[in-house]
Image (cartoon, grey):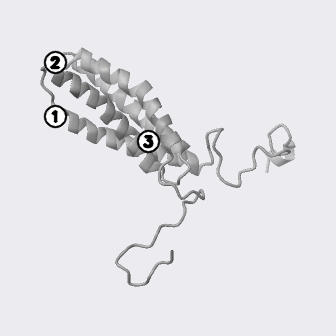
Amino acid sequence: MAAVTGSPLPAPSPASPTGSSRRWDREALWAGAAVALVFAIPLTVLAAVVGSDSGGLNALFFFGAMFGFVLGAGCAAWMQTCGTPISHGLVAAAATYLVVQGVFVIARLVTGRDVDWFGLMFTLSLVLLAGVVGGFLGQRLQDQGVYPSNRRPPGDRSDAPGTSPSHRTRREENR
């Protein structure tokens, strides 16, 4: 479909730099969400259990959870093949937080306890920031040529015969 000059609609976007025209890499999003679930959510639960009585310990758990969201977002951004690492990091972190907090909110409402809506929204804003930071870090890994072993950029022939480190000569490695 060709873009018409003067059309009020934007021209269709070309395929991403990796050659894919998909918007979301579901495998990368699932991987990022799984990492965030493993690292961030247990610390979030510990922070809730400790409560605000122990300020220092609660802060330690909170910042540990934020690091978990950065790690999960970075994993999603690093693994994606659509050319949109920051979007993948943002979505992985936000979706993980929203799903888990949704469960916690429902549990609180069912048991008749109050929900701190302001606290949830404030923490969501920090999780979104963690998603952007993780997305940026995942993008930096890809920009430096570091890819997951199961995902390589198009045209990468590092697994072709004669290109593995065991097949290279010292002269080739020193270039």
Residue denoted by label 2: 111
Q: Is residue 149 at least partly visible in the picture?
A: yes
* Residue at point 41%, 28% (across, down): 37
Query: 34 left or right of 101?
Result: right
**Mark 1 residue crowding within 10 angstroms, few (<14) / some (14–19) / many (20+):** few
Q: Which residue reaches farthest bottom?
A: 6
Work out whether residue 102 or residue 141 is closer to the camera in this orientation and state it: 102
Secondary structure under tag 2 reads: loop
User: Residue under circle 1?
Assistant: 117
Disc 2 to disc 1, C-alpha distance: 16 Å
Query: Gap between marks 3 and 1, in whole Å?
Result: 25 Å
Total number of numbered labels?
3
**Which residue is depicted at the point 63% across and 48% down?**
145
**Lateral position of residue 153 relative to residue 47, left or right:** right
The tag on residue 134 is 3
Disc 3 versus disc 2: distance between alpha carbons? 35 Å
Residue 19: x and y in percent read 60, 59
The residue type indicated by label 1 comes to: Trp
Q: Quadrant of residue 46?
A: top left
Q: In this rendering, is residue 43 above or below 165?
A: above
Relative to 18, does residue 80 appear above or below in the rendering? Answer: above
Give amino acid for label 3: Gly
Q: Which mark, by number, is residue 53?
A: none
- Is any part of residue 133 visible from this angle? no
